[in-house]
Structures are given as C-alpha cells and as structure tokens.
Image (spheres, rainbow, N blue to C red):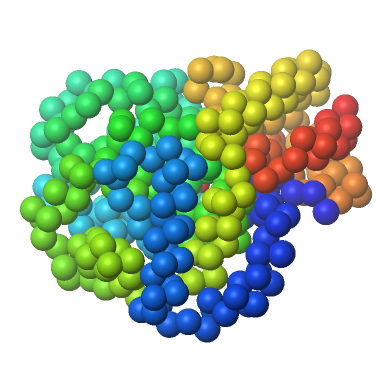
Amino acid sequence: MITFYPGPSKIYPQIGQYLQDAVAEGILSQNHRSQAFMDMLKDCVSLFKQKLNIPADYHVYFTSSATECWEIIAQSFTAKGSLHIFNGAFGQKWFEYTRKIVGDSTFDIPFSFEEKIPILETDTSKYDILCITQNETSNATQVDVSQIPPSEALIAFDVTSSIGGIELDWTKGDIWLASVQKCLGLPAGLGVIICSPKAIKQAEIIGERKHYNSFLFIHENFGKYQTHYTPNVLSIYLLKRVMEQIENIEQISRKLKARNQDFCQFIEQETVWQLLINNESVRSDTVIAIEGVSDAIKKIKQKAKEAEITLGNGYGNWKETTFRIANFPAIEDWEFGALKEIIE
Ligand SMILES: *Cc1c(COP(=O)(O)O)cnc(C)c1O
C-alpha cells in the first residue's frame, strides 16, 4: 500500500518498531511528572531543534494539533488584533477561527494563489500579529518567508505541511505552528509551536491566563520539562525516535526539492496533465497539485486504486479536476517511480 495523501500521510516505516520499543521501555506507563518523562521530553525537544536547525534561543512546545495552535495564538498573543494574509482554505480557516475568538479586530488580506504574497504597505503597529500560512496544503502553494519584511507585529507562520521537509529560516518568524502527521511522517495527535524570545515577551506583556491552554501555562510547564495537561506521551516518544533517525533538515530539504523539480518536469511533459500552479516561484516543494479534466481524474484514481496507490483528493473547488501528491520525506523514491508508471 502506497499513499501520497497530504495528511494524514505516510508514516516512517520504522514507526512499527518504535511502537514496540515504547511499550518495552515502559515509558507509556510513566506519569508525566516523572523524571523518565521529563528526560524524554527534554531529549525530544533538543533533538528536534538540532535536526531542524532551530536557533538556541527559540522555544519548542507540544500541543494536540495545529488547529489548537491557532486557538492558542488567538487567545494568548492577540490583544489589539491580528492580520491574516492568505490564499487558500487553511489560511482562511485560521482567520475565521481567530475572528470567532478575538472578534472584529481580526483582519484579512486574501491574495491570488498564482501571485506572490503582497508586500505589506499597511502600518503593522495596529496589530499584535501577522498570520501567514507558509505552505498552503489546499492549493499547493508556498510563501517565501524571506519576503516578509520585519515588522513590529509578531509574525506567525503555519508550517504544518512543510516542517521536517524543507529548511526554514526561523529568524524570519516569531511563532511557527504545525502538527506531526504530514511532513514529519508520524501518526496524528501532536501539535508543535515554536516561539522566538520576542513572542514570549509579548505573551508576558499580554498576560492572558484564562484557558487551560493559555500560552503562559504551557511555557511555564515546559520550562520544567512538564506539560500543562497529560500529554500524548506516545507521540512525543515517536517524535524523539524519528528525530534520532533522520538526517539534518539541510540534506532532507535538498533531496525533496530535487524530487519536486523532477516530478513537476515529468508532469509538464504529459499532455493529459498540468500543474495547478503555473507560477513556479509560488509552487510548494512538499505538496503538488495536478490538474486534468474530471474524466481523466476519475480514470487515474481508478488505475491508482488497482495498483494500491492512494492519491490525494483535490481540495474544495478543485475536487473534481485535480489530485494532490505529497512530497514528504517518509515517501521513498521508488514510490514516486511507481506513481510515474501509473500516470504515464
Ligand atoms: C492539516 C493542516 C492544518 C490542521 O492540522 P491539524 O493537526 O488537523 O489541526 C492546519 N494548517 C495546515 C496548513 C494544514 O495543512
């Protein structure tokens, strides 16, 4: 069984062994205030920072999902208001949830998925935070973070479908949020939030402590390598093991980008198919959307099914006329070979 679904997606094949190890090592029966758990959490965070080249003064926290991270940002980092700049379904959802929590001081700037993110001429001092979906899983586009000018407001990036796949310049953002079931190749059930010193300072100024998942509670608990509620110990353990196993993100990123280029060139040669995103400079490295007439889509899905290959469905408006392919590191090159054979 091969899957190119962009989330939940293929898990690293080693996960089966790690699950057995977790049981054998007894970590799953340990309480989350025990030394064994605290040591494991500490190792996990440290390996995560090391493999992904996250600056030493940035902090890593675990939550339950990327969606929960959106909520935490709205609750704990937003007092004046937020500005959401997006071109697709995930960015829009983030905006809508924030608006429900924060209210009328939530603003949006939608932009076209074939265009680069607009350079802000707005005075950002009106906002606490700018919210940007770095990799828009729904339409297979990405934002080059180096194009976002530094601002007084915090900059938050949703990197759910790119973290662990491409190298990110962490210094360009203050808050980075994600979950583990996409590019990190793990089972669903764990979210990640990464904060700069500036973000932590802002949360302290705002001082919000009304929710079980108020950022300051999370921050204070993680300072002791503890968590604000009983966490997904298994998932943290699996993440630690995966972080031990993978190469540095620089190498992973280089390979994924090359595979993306190769696959996109392959699609461009096919007469039945084209890439949904024409503008190469905004095309995602980790999610590829392929367009064709709905009849062709039906046929390819059937053919793939017979070969036990799962393709990602198109999203929203593109459901009938596109399919999506995850280019995540847990997917192996030979699987892309098998996919090409189906498409040819
Ligand atoms: C999948 C996805 C989410 C939601 O992740 P959950 O873990 O289900 O909360 C958010 N943002 C982006 C860009 C995604 O691809």
Q: Quadrant of residue 247?
A: top right
The spot of residue 152 in percent (x, y) is 14, 33
Q: Residue at x 43, y 33 (%)?
A: 168
Residue 123, above or below 237: above
Q: Is residue 187 above or below residue 278?
A: below
Give percent across and percent down for residue 11.
67, 54
Q: Is residue 8 visible?
A: yes
Whether residue 314 is visible to the viewer of this picture, yes or no, is no
Quadrant housing the C terminus: top right
Task: Relative to 45, say whether 116 is above or below.
Answer: above
Nearest the camera: 13 or 98?
Answer: 13
Locate residue 309 relative to residue 220 in the image: left or right: right
Q: Which of these two is toward me, 280 or 102?
A: 280
**Is 49 on the left or on the right of 214, as rendered?**
right
In x, y percent, where is residue 105? 16, 47
In the picture as drawn, the residue positioned furthest to the right comes out as: 306
In the image, taking residue 135 as reference, residue 18 lies left or right, namely right
Residue at 60% of width from left, 45% of height from top?
246
Q: Classify residue 279 by image quadrant.
A: top right
Point 38% across, 30% down: residue: 169
Residue positioned 43% across, 82% down in the render = 31
> Residue 26, position in %: x, y?
57, 80
User: As rendered, which of 76 and 167 lies closer to the eye?
Assistant: 167
**To which quarter of the image does residue 286 belong?**
top right
